[in-house]
Image (spheres, grey):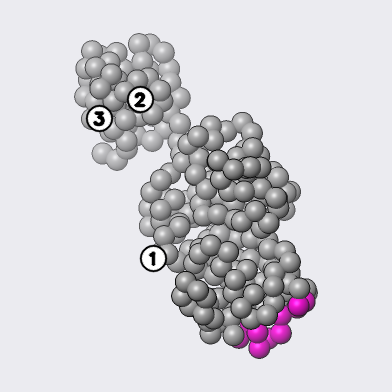
Amino acid sequence: MKGERLDKVLARLGLGSRKEVARLVRQGKVRVLGQVVKDPGFRVPEGAALEVEGRPLEVRRHLHVLLHKPPGFVTSRTEGPSVYALLQGFPTRDLSPVGRLDKDAEGLLLFTTDGLLLHRLTHPRFGVRKVYRVWTEGGTLPKEVCRRLLLGVDLEDGPARALACRPAPGGAVLVLAEGRKREVRRMLQRVGYPVRRLLRLQVGPIRLGDLPPGKWRRLSEREVKALLRLGGLE
């Protein structure tokens, strides 16, 4: 049967340690879908109703959040001003960012409580694509500069290349599949077009859309399924 272990679910909901909640289960104090379950390893179907000593519990599912990060915020818990200050109303202790945006960058920043999905979306092996709109000090990128970025440029930590590059007023639209530190800025600096403004528009199938800066929203069921599918976890 698919699902999460009963003792793990109860511990995650704050009813005690795995050992403590296992004792509750063996004492017959836990019901799943109205039936007493005495096996701590019982697999709880997703969304199943739970009761402990007659009290109903809400089983929390993984949380996935999209934030439109404004410039001036850091993707960190220990420094400030932090993007976590913008996530009002969430148990941010459990939320981890899916990759990072530097302090001056803005745009789409995902958060999740699903550690496995986080790994799949950030590990270079999975090549999750990110779309960026950049404005540069040199203005609109010439097509020959785009071609250089598509062929690849040498950075201090190895070669890097764009998967797609399209000139746009004042800069360009770039698609990358890596997530190295300040990679977009370093690539454009390398070709003589320092970045003035960097806006991330998309990560995988998730788009920023018209979400205002500083605001967040939960991902829809469709978006979550698309991310799980991208990470091979559907």
* Residue 125 marker: 1
Q: Which residue is mark 2?
A: 10
CA neighbours of label 2 inside 10 A, class few (<14), some (14 to 19), many (20+): many
Q: Toward which corner of the image does residue 202 lie, by quadrant?
A: bottom right
Which quarter of the rendering shows the N terminus? Answer: top left
Q: Is 154 above or below relative to 177?
A: below
Q: Earlier in the sequence, mark 3 or mark 2?
A: 2
Q: Toward which corner of the image does residue 14 lie, by quadrant?
A: top left
Name the residue located 55 percent from the left edge and 40 percent from the top edge.
78
* Residue 7 marker: none
145 and 82: which one is in front?
Answer: 82
CB atoms of marks 1 and 2 within 8 Å = no
What is the secondary structure assignment of the residue under circle 1?
helix
220 and 116: which one is in front?
Answer: 116
Name the residue located 29 percent from the left edge and 32 percent from the top edge.
5
Magenta region, residue range: 138-147
Name the residue located 57 percent from the left edge and 33 percent from the top edge.
90
Regarding residue 59, the answer to whether it shows in the image is yes
What is the secondary structure assignment of the residue under circle 3?
loop
Image position, residue 19 (x, y; %): 25, 22
